[in-house]
Amino acid sequence: MYFLKFSFVALWLSSQVFAQGFDSRSCLDAEYKTEISHQGKFFGLIKNDLKIEKSHCHIKVTYKKILETVWDIDLCREPIHMKITSKGSQSVYKRDGKTCDTNKSDYCRYWQELDGIIQDHGLIFAEGDREDLNSAHGQTYCVNLLLKKYLAKGFLFSKYSENVDIFADENESCAIPDSSNSTQDTQSLNAQSDVNRTEERTEETFEKTADDMIGEKPQAGPSFKPAPAESIEKKF
């Protein structure tokens, strides 16, 4: 009897913790399955089905529109890689150590495809709160953070390490720039402004000089008067 009460209390407390927001460790250790489905094109005749299965470090994402594609990822296994099953065959794509911002490898292409599917067909349509790990939205959000850390950033997880922070990269866009960099930027902007002002003044001076030259009346040259007829006759 006491054991049942204790189990009920522990379950209630864990659900309250998840409802308030999960941390990195609980996200990595979580085990769950969630499915998200919504109508697609052609008047809803084609459905978009997304299924996420997670067991500690192992994540399996299945997406089906017309054909089915499966991403199989182990967050605690190196080298950083993913197994993809599509059209009845399985392929393995390994991370080459470069970021996918400028890299056009097959690995980056499949990772970007997976990231887009989770966002467009998971996070947008999943029900529940993002901070609730018991909801479809929270479970999808948790997997999205883990995959970004592992596949995009190249971070290898461990079941036994406490040094886990999947939220560190979420606030990079809001980071305050370094004061030294901002000072250098301000100085360069000021220098560029001085150059621009100097060029403007030079152009204005040139325009004024040209206008003055155009507006001036031409100076009359030396006048020539014909000699009197009498002086001409005397010469002859």
Image (cartoon, rainbow, N blue to C red):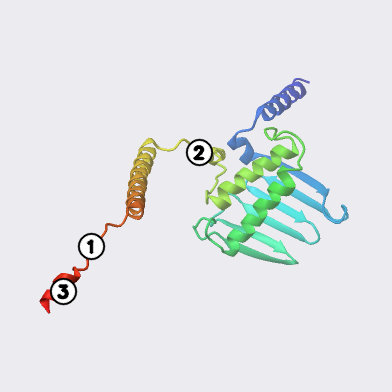
Residue 34 drawn above or below residue 210:
above
Q: Earlier in the sequence, mark 3 or mark 2?
A: 2
Q: Which residue is mark 1?
A: 223
Task: State the image quarter where residue 229 is shown.
Answer: bottom left
Picture coordinates of residue 138, whole percent (x, y): 70, 37
| Residues at marks 2 and 1, CA–CA distance in whole angstroms | 100 Å
Q: Which residue is mark 2?
A: 163
Residue 161 visible in this rendered orientation of the protein: no
Neighbourhood count class around disc 1 (C-alpha, 10 Å): few under 14, some 14–19, many 20 upward: few
**Amino acid type indicated by mark 2:** Asn
Neighbourhood count class around disc 3 (C-alpha, 10 Å): few under 14, some 14–19, many 20 upward: few
Question: Which of the pair 211/142 is nearer the observer?
Answer: 211
* Direction left: furthest residue: 235
- The reply, left or right, for residue 76 in relation to residue 89 is left
**Amino acid type indicated by mark 1:** Ser
Q: Which quarter of the figure is the N terminus placed in?
A: top right
Secondary structure at badge 3 equals: helix
| Residues at marks 3 and 2, CA–CA distance in whole angstroms | 118 Å
**Amino acid type indicated by mark 3:** Ile
Secondary structure at badge 2 equals: loop
Q: Which residue is mark 3?
A: 232
Picture coordinates of residue 121, whole percent (x, y): 74, 48
Q: Earlier in the sequence, mark 1 or mark 3?
A: 1
Q: Earlier in the sequence, mark 2 or mark 1?
A: 2
| Residues at marks 1 and 3, CA–CA distance in whole angstroms | 19 Å
Question: Which of the pair 104/63 is nearer the observer?
Answer: 104
